[in-house]
Image: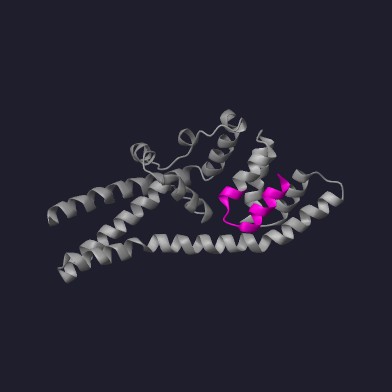
Amino acid sequence: MNNIMVSVVIFITAIFVIEMCIYAYSIIRNPDRSLIRKRLHLFSADRAQGIPDIEAKRMLSEVPTVHKILLHIPGIGSLERFLRQANVGYPPGFFILLVAVLALFGYLAGHLILNQNAYAFILGAAVGTIPIVTLWRKKQKRMKQFTAQLPEALDLIARALRAGHSFTSGMKLAADEFTDPLGPEFEETLDEINYGAAISEALRALAARIDCAELKYFVISVI
């Protein structure tokens, strides 16, 4: 049993190291890679026509084999959305491997120290949840920041409309005025509109990305 667990740990650790090295190399070689991917995603003809083609565009792992496996895992879209809301740069495959490696090392450490499988599993689960809790707290903080920025941003858009500007011009003013998270999220929405998406479609995508009830009311009102 121990030999099997050690083999599993070595295998998953090897995949994790490969994923981490490829990801680090891609960032060092091309620091604007994520921005380029986003631009290419927005240029997609299918997206401009409102036809979702998520599996063909999103990159779930830097390792092609892991990417193909993750495409068939239920709930991977929710994990991808969670990572996006936390504003982390790494793909879901990296996060899953990180959780798995920490959980396995926690289990092995518990098994070696306590020599009881039950306590080892508990320790492994506790260690494995550290990245999840960390990202959840980061996501909550970012969503609270967005909610705090929203009233002033909406007031800016309203003043722009009263001054005779278009709705998209008002959003552009807000995108330029505010820092993360509101500024970049509004900027992405404007990019979608500029590349052919309907305003209603782009606003629905914005509401889907952000956990904010006030934003959803705003989107419904505009639509």
- The spot of residue 107 in percent (x, y) is 23, 62
**Please, what is the dominant secondary structure of the magenta stretch?**
helix
Viewer-side residue, 29 vs 68 = 68
Percent across and percent down for residue 166 are: 80, 43
Q: Residue furthest top?
A: 45
- Verify whether residue 216 appears in magenta: yes
Q: Nearer the viewer, residue 150 or 4?
A: 150
Q: Residue at x 42, y 42 (%)?
A: 60
**Left or right: 123, with 115 as reference point:** right
Count of marks overlaid on the render: 0
- Is 2 on the left-hand or right-hand side of 177? left
Q: Quadrant of the C terminus?
A: top right
Residue sticking out furthest to the bottom: 114
Residue shown at 83% from the left, 46% from the top: 165
Image-quadrant location for residue 150: bottom right
Question: Which region shows up in magenta?
Answer: 207-223
Specify the quadrant that holds the N terminus. bottom left
Which residue is depicted at the point 67% across and 54% down?
Answer: 217
State the image coordinates of residue 168 (x, y, percent, origin top left): 75, 44
Residue 180 makes an appearance in the image: no
Q: Is residue 184 left or right of residue 122?
A: right
**Image coloring type:** one colour
Residue 161 visible (yes or no): yes
Magenta stretch: includes residue 164? no
| Residue 184 image position (x, y, % from top left) | 63, 51
Between residues 152 and 14, which one lies in front from this camera angle? 152
Q: Is residue 147 above or below residue 167?
A: below
